Amino acid sequence: MAPPFSKETHELLERAQRAIDESIRLREDSQRAIRQAESWQFELELRLSRERTAAI
């Protein structure tokens, strides 16, 4: 059986895991923001198209 990690190694591993978790959270937030922006863009283009059609 391998010996347990030293306190310093354990702390470094915890910091690394927190950084990974934060990176994953930020990526998910970014993906949600991109999807929302794409939805707004689609809605805007649809509305502009309808307004152009109505103006003719």
Image: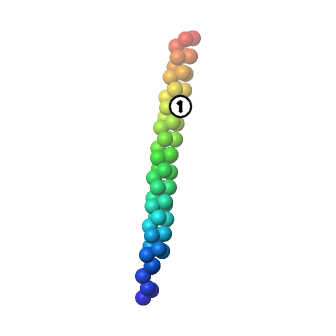
Image coordinates of residue 32 in percent, x first then y, are: 47, 44
Q: From what the image shows, is residue 7 above or below residue 37? A: below
Residue 51 in the image: x percent, y percent? 52, 17
Comparing 14 with 24, the one in front is 14
Percent coordinates x, y for residue 16 in the rendering: 49, 65
Q: Relative to residue 11, is residue 48 drawn left or right?
A: right
Return the x and y of residue 17 as percentages of the image width and height. 46, 64
Q: Considering depth in this image, is 40 or 19 the residue closer to the camera?
A: 19
> Is the residue 43 above or below the residue 15 in the image?
above
Quarter of the N terminus within the rendering = bottom left
User: Given the current orientation, which residue lies at the most extreme bottom position?
Assistant: 1
Q: Which residue is mark 1?
A: 41
Q: Secondary structure at mark 1?
A: helix
Name the residue located 48 percent from the left edge and 50 percent from the top edge. 26
Can you name the residue that lies furthest to the front here? 8
Q: Is residue 39 above or below residue 29?
A: above
For the point 44% across and 86% down, the residue is 2
Q: Quadrant of the C terminus?
A: top right
